[in-house]
Amino acid sequence: MQFKDTLRKLILLSITAFAVFSCITVDKSLGGQYIPDDQELKVMVAEFRLPISLKMEDSLQGISAEYATFGAIRTKEFGLATFGVAANICQPYTSFRFGKDPVIKSVYFSAAVANKYMIDNTQEGIPQNVFIYRTTKTLDTTTLYNNSLTKKDYNPVPLNVSSFTYFGKDSVKVYLNNAFGTELLSATEKELDSISLFTNRFKGLYIECTPPEGDLTGGRLNNLSYSSAVIAIKYNFQPTWEAGLSRKDTTVLFNFGDSFCLNLSTYSSSHMATDEPLTAEIPIEGIGGIKPYVNAKALKDTLNNWFTKKGYNSRNILVAKATLTFPFEIPQDLNMTSYPPNLFPIYKSDTLIRRLYYPFKDINVPGNSTGEMNRSLCEYSVNIPSTIQKLINVQADANNPLSNEFNFWLSPIRVETDPNYGTTNYFAETYSYYNGKINGPKAKRYPKLTLVYTVLK
C-alpha cells in the first residue's frame, strides 16, 4: 500500500510539473516598440475587373521544326478556319549520283501523321481532298515567321497526278506529276552542294486541303511529322560511274524543307474583333484566331484611378502577387474537349521582318502558374507580379506611350522540355484548334486582377 501511495504522489507531481512548464505564453509584440511607425509593412489585397476586348493574333508565327500542319475546320462560333503548310524543296542529305537518261516511274510526297485535332471526335475519318502546289518564291527571312505567303506566291495548278482524298489515316502519300521529278533530277553538282543555289532554283511546295462542304460544321486539323516529310522519286537510269553497267532502278528522297516549315492559317472570325470592352461570354479561338485581349493603357488607367482614390503614390507600391483569374462555366453537355488545357498572357513583339508572340517572363519563375485549367474552381489562373509591377512603375503619357509589350492576349500555350539540357521553353500554341469560352466582365464571376501589395513609406 505504501508503494502505491508513493507512486500516486509521483504521478501527480509529474502532471503538475508538466502543466507548469508547458503553459508558456509567447509575446509576439516583443521588440515591436523599437520599430518606427513609418517602417511597418502592411500587406493588403485589392481586386480589379479586367477590361477585356477581342483581337486576332494576327500573323502568328508558324515556323516549326516539329509539325507540318494542314486542314480545315468550320464552327458555328467562328466560321471557317483553314490551315496550310509550305517549305522549300531541298536536296538529299547525302551525296547522290542521279546517272543519266532517267525514266521516271513515280513521284510522290510522303509523311507520317503525328496527331490530329477535331472539334468533334466523330470527324476523325472524314474525307479531305489534299492539293500540293509549287511555290513561285523561296521561303526566306521575310516569310519565315508570318502569314506572308499569298495565292500569288504559288502556281494555282496543283502538282497532283489526280485528286487525293485523305481519310485521317496514319500517313499521307500524294502522287505528283512525273515532269516535276524529271526537273529535280536535272540539278547540277553545284546546286546539289549548295542549299541556297538549290532552293533558289526549285523553290518549294505548299499543301492545303478542301474545307467541309457547304455550311457543314466540323473538319480536322492534321499535324504531319515534319522530319518524315519527303519527295520520293522512283526511276530507272543508266549508271555513269563505271562502263558496261546495265540500267538500274532506284529511289531518291528530296527533303521537304531544310530545317523548318511554315504553317499558315486564315480565319473567318476576324469580323468579331472589337476594341470595345465586352460584357457577355468571351470566346477563345485556337492558333491565330480571335482571343481575349487586355489593353495595357486601359488597365493602367484603372490602377491609376484607384491609386488616386486611395491617396497612394504609385512609385511606392510594392507588388507581392498579381493574379489574373478567368472564370468559365461548365457547358451543359459537360464536354470540355474544346477548352484549352491552359491559358497564359502573351504579347506581340514586332521587328522589321517578323512578328513574334511571347509569354510574359513571369512564366519562367518557379512556382508561378502557367495558367492551367482548374475544373473544380472552373477557372484559369496565372500569376504575373513582375509584369504588373513594371506596368505600375512605367511613366507613360502622350509623348511617351506605353510599350506594346504590355498589351496581351489570353492564349493557349505549349510547354517543351529539352531532354538534353533539361531546359523548358514556352510557345504560343500553334497545333491545336480550341474554341472555349470564359466569363465576361459583367458575369457574377468575372475576369479579374487580384493584387497583393504593400505601400512603402
Image (cartoon, rainbow, N blue to C red):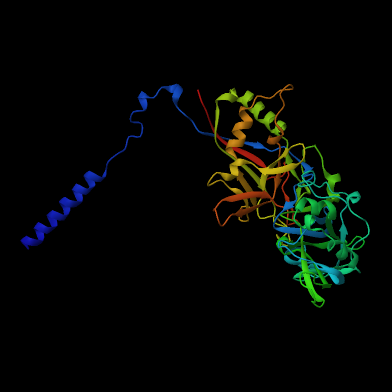
Whether residue 81 appears in this view of the structure is no
Residue 357 in the image: above or below residue 94: above
Quarter of the image holding residue 192?
bottom right
Please, which residue is most extreme toward the left here? 2
Q: Quadrant of the N terminus?
A: bottom left
Label count reads 0
Quarter of the image holding residue 91?
bottom right
Q: Nearer the viewer, residue 49 or 344?
A: 344
Q: Nearer the viewer, residue 194 or 215?
A: 194
Name the side, left or right, on which 315 lies relative to 184: left
Residue 96 in the image: above or below residue 312: below
Name the side, left or right, on which 369 lies relative to 39: right
Quarter of the image holding residue 390?
top right
Q: Position of residue 332 (x, y in %)?
A: 73, 60
Please, which residue is most extreme toward the front here? 243
Q: Position of residue 62 (x, y in %)?
A: 75, 50
Whether residue 96 appears in this view of the structure is yes
Q: Position of residue 389 (x, y in %)?
A: 59, 32
Q: Nearer the viewer, residue 98 or 354?
A: 98
Q: Position of residue 268 (x, y in %)?
A: 86, 50
The residue at 89%/68% (across/down) is: 178
